[in-house]
Structure formats: structure tokens, C-alpha cells
Amino acid sequence: MRLGDLLRVSIRQLLRHRRRYWGVILAIAIGTAGFITIITMGRDLKKNFNRDLELLGKATLIRIYFEKRPSFGYQRFQPSTLEALRRLPGVSEASLVAQHPWVLGSWQGRDYHFALLGVDESFWKVNGLTPQGGKFFTSGDTNYSQRVCILGPELARTIFGREKVVGDQLAMQQELYTVTAVLNGAGLGDYAHFAFMPLSTAENRIQGISPANRIYLRCRTWEDVGKVAPLIPGAIQAVQPVQGLKVEVAWDHLRRVEAVAWWVELFIYSSIVATLILGGVGIWTVMMAAVRSRTREIGLKKAMGAEDQAIMAQFLAEAVCLSVAASLLGSALGFVSVEVTSLLIHSHPGQGLFLMCVLLGLLVAVGLGVAAGIYPSLRASRMEVVSAIRYE
Amino acid sequence: MTPGNGGPLIRVTRLSKHYSNGHGVIPVLRGVNLEVRPGEMVAVMGPSGSGKSTLLFILGLLQPASSGKYQFMGQDMLALSRAAQAEFRRRQVGFVFQNCDLFENSTVYENLEFPLVYAKVERQERPDRITAALERVNLAHRIHHPANHLSGGEKQRVAIARALVNEPLVILADEPTGHLDRTHGHMVMDHFEKVVAAGDTALIVVTHDPQVAERCSRIFSLEDGILNEN
């Protein structure tokens, strides 16, 4: 039997008995669509999942600093170090920070002590912080060491008795600073009690501020943290000495996040595998039923001279056509699902990845069709002609 | 394989068939001898269970014999491999069964196409051969009809056309008029006669019906597994 005839006859057979195959097609299609969505959107979903989780556990945040030891002096990170770290694979953003643990501030004659951080423009993104009112520092503020500051909401309430303080002025070390924003965001934590100013301003105007000896580094996903952390000392050493360098990773948080993610992934992949197995069992069942109900047809075809291989090939081709049809439907559903997910998480994956998943889905479908169809096809091919013809 | 000059198409010698069950051996055919020449119409009659269909199935290599000799144009048929048996059925034999046995979800054309598909006939040749076969049973106008929309008589004529489409040397018909009324039964036999008269095709028909048997050139009866010519 020629391949063209085989495919034509198989597709015709499926179309004419489509009602009996709908359930199986749908099961495999859903499995395939799930597979395509998870693989195509996986990275972006993880990023979103990551963004939501990291703010709770800071699992993807790496803290890098020089220990404050007299023998090493006060080391500071060079701007080129920051650039080198940003270039590491898996790094999303890095921020350079200087700190003063106990700066003196005053408002309306009353003194307050609070922690002050001198930060660069990336600090807010790295820590997932947003302005509640006002705006973050502009490049002009940074370049010209302007006297501006941002307050944590608790600090604003402590000093001013309210959170809406944008435009108000606060004195620090005898100089007045204009409040440009009050912070907000899930990653606030202790920063609610902090004051912030541009790094250049802090280094130039605040006495007793540490050198910029602290870097906060945000990884893209929690999976990147374990890969990035060991690369950090080498990347820094290529630029400057590393005596007293400390790299801190929240391993406990990370492991918990990884454990949660692992269980979620296990659940999703198990569901997909279960759906595909169900689809496979479905194919097996409908093909077995088809072999039984078409016993006389098989006998007749053998009487016409069909060889065992031709009968086997026909049933196998029907099983493969069935699973490929299901996979194509699944690809269409997967496309819709990817588009919808993209809209929901504001991220669009590459076409290449999607097409690769469709191709992979088709290959899996062919494998499933062959695996599930092989036994029924063998049974059909080995049927004795006379008993098949006499089958009622 | 083409018919030889004057020699028998089919020669069966001391052919036996028995079945074994838990209680012993049940003989079905006992030392059957039969010769059929090209263009002959042969009827095999006998009561139910006498082994008529079994003989037909053995001649069509659908079932093995227990012992004896079966030659088709001088070739030993009982020694053929499974693949060679299928090849023989594709090229030399056309079957017509009692129940018409068309593929119900297919059209008349598709029914007749299957033997050509298995014989690997080129696709462009098929329409002409199918039309020619249908013309021989006066059903060319039904070529694209669904098989399940045909009457019983038409179905049996399509079954005959399907048996003819590969231009076999022998047609083996198992009670071909069994499910038809007398008029349609006669019509089917008319078509068989036409086919046999047109060439070297032989017909072996198994039947209960004496009127069908009378249309054949030779009549055999099979009783208790023994075949006798009337």
C-alpha cells in the first residue's frame, strides 16, 4: 500500500467516524495546549511568580559588601565593578549603596535619628519599591548632588506626623533637603524607617557616610541565584581587590521558594502527563474498539489481498492521524492560551520558542499515536481471515 | 501467471480438511478432487455445514488445507508463504460473499478502489478500471453513491464489480444470491454469466439454490466432506 493511499484512507476513516474520536482528540489537545503554554510561557511566568515572591522573601536578592575591618580600610565598589556584575548571565539589575546608620535630622526644632542610604537610580527597581507620592530622583538630582531625599512612610509619619510630605523640607546635618517622594511597595520592610538620597549627594554632603561598599544584585529568577552567586567574586576580582568581600544569599528563602516552585511545577507537569496518558489510553481504547467493530472489514481486506503489514499500517496510521489531529487542535488552543497569558502577564515570548513547542508537541503526538496504536494494529494484522469474515 | 493452453486452472487432489476440538478430530473435507478450467462456471451444492464454504476458502487461500494437493495453473498453492498467498488473492482471485460485505461508510468508487490500492495500481488508472468493472454490472451511474444507500441487489452487483476490478482468473462466490429475492438473484447470475462468457475467468459458486446451480456448466455436490459431480 502506497503512503499516499495509506494517509488518504486513514484520514477519510477518521473523518467519517469523527464522533467516536472527539473525546480522545479533546483530551490530547488539552494536554498539548498545556504543554505548549507551560513551556512557551514558563520563563515569563517564573519571572512574574518570582517578582511576586521575591518581594516577600527577597529570595533572588544577593547582597555584596566589604566587611568594615580596619586592616582592609574602607573599601568602596568601583562603577566598573557594578557594570561587570550587571553583565553576569542571570542578573536583572544591580545597585550601589552607601549608608549612614544614625544620621541626625531635625524638623521644627525637634531632632530625629534615622538610617540614611545613598542610592543610585537602580535601587528602587532592585528592591521593588515605588513612590507613594512624588517621584524618584532625576538624573539632574544625581548629577548635581541636589539636596533632595525620599522617606520611608514610617519615618515620614514619625517626623511630620503624616505621609503626604512631598515638597516639605527636612534638615540633615544642618542642611535642608526637599522630600521628593514617600516610598511604597511590597519590598518596603525596614526601609519604611529609612531616609534616602542620591549617592552623589550622600557622598558629597553627609559626614560619616560609609563609602559605597554595598551592592544589591537582583537575579532574574530564583533558579539564577545559585548560578550567579559563585561568579560574583571572580567578576569583582577582575576589576578590583576583593579582601573582605562578602556575598550574602538568602539561601533559606531561596530553598523555600524553590521547593514551592518545584511542587507547583510537579503538579502542572503531572497534570499534563496524566492528560497525555489519558489521551494515549483513549487512543488505545478507541483503536481496540475500532479493530473489534471492523473485524469483518479486516477480513474482507485480507480477502482482497491486503497483507498483514498493510492492515497494521492502516490502523497505525489512523492512530497517528488521530493524535496528530489532536495535537494540531492542541497547538491552536496553545496559541490562544499563550496569547491570553501574554496579555495577563504583560510579556510576550519569542515566536521561535512557540514554534519549537508546537513541533515538539507534534513529535510527542506521533509517539503517542504509535505507542497507543501499535497493539491494536498488531491485533488487526494478525487476525485470521476466515474468522474475521465470519465475525458477527 | 496466465492461463495455460487447455490445462486446468485449478486442480485439487485428495484435499482434506479437519478441525480439532477438545473431543477429537472433525473431518470437513475428505479427499476432494476437483478440476476447473478457464471460463467454466462450477456450482458446489450441499446442505449447511457440509464444508462448501470451507472448500471455497481453501481455494482462495483464506484457510489452509489439512492435507492433499492444490495446484493453480500448475503451481503448488499449499506451499506459498503468507505474503505470496496475499499476492495470489490480489491478482488471481475475486471473492463475492453472501452478505454483500461492502464497506458501508464508503462510496461505490471507494469500495472498488481498495483492491486496486492493495495491488498498487497507479491512481490515475483507477477511475477507468472502476468504471469498466461497474459497467459490467450496469452500475456505472452509481459510481459515487454511498454504499449504504444501495438496494440489496445493487450491493451484490457492486460486490461482483469489486471482485472483477483486478481482472482475476477465478471468482469464488459464497452464496452470492442467498440474501436476494429471485429476480435479483437471476440478475446477479446473468452478470456472472456475462463475465465468464467475456473471457477466461472461471467461476466457482457455492449455493443452496438449485436454480443458481442450473445456470452453471458443472454442478458438484458436497456431502459428508465428499465431493461428487452430478
Image: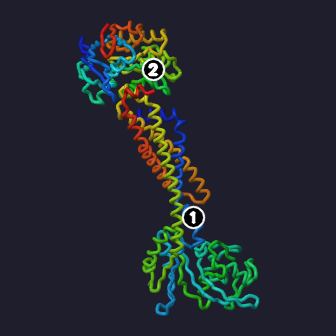
Tell me if I can see residue B88 in this picture.
Answer: no
**Real-space Cα separation, disc 2 to disc 1, in angstroms:** 65 Å
Residue designated by label 1: A49
Residue A227: name its quadrant.
bottom left
Q: Is residue B82 shown above or below A134?
A: above
Determine the residue located farthest toward the front in the rendered image: B23
Q: Nearer the viewer, mark 2 or mark 1?
A: 2
Q: Position of residue B9 (x, y in %)?
A: 27, 15
Give the colour scheme of this rendering: rainbow
Tell me if I can see residue A77 in this picture.
Answer: yes
Name the residue nearer the viewer: A273 or A131: A273
Q: Position of residue B108 (x, y in %)?
A: 47, 22
Give me the disc on residue B100.
Answer: 2
Q: Position of residue A192 (x, y in %)?
A: 66, 79
Q: Mark 1 falls within which chain?
A: A
For numbered disc 1, what is the local secondary structure? helix
Q: Position of residue B219 (x, y in %)?
A: 34, 9
Q: Is residue B198 left or right of residue A45?
A: left
Name the residue nearer the viewer: A198 or A338: A338
Q: Is residue A20 shown above or below A299?
A: below
Q: Is residue A223 shown above or below A329?
A: below
Q: Mark 2 falls within which chain?
A: B
Going 44% across and 14% down the picture, which residue do you hit? B177
Residue type at the position of mark 1: Phe
Residue type at the position of mark 2: Cys
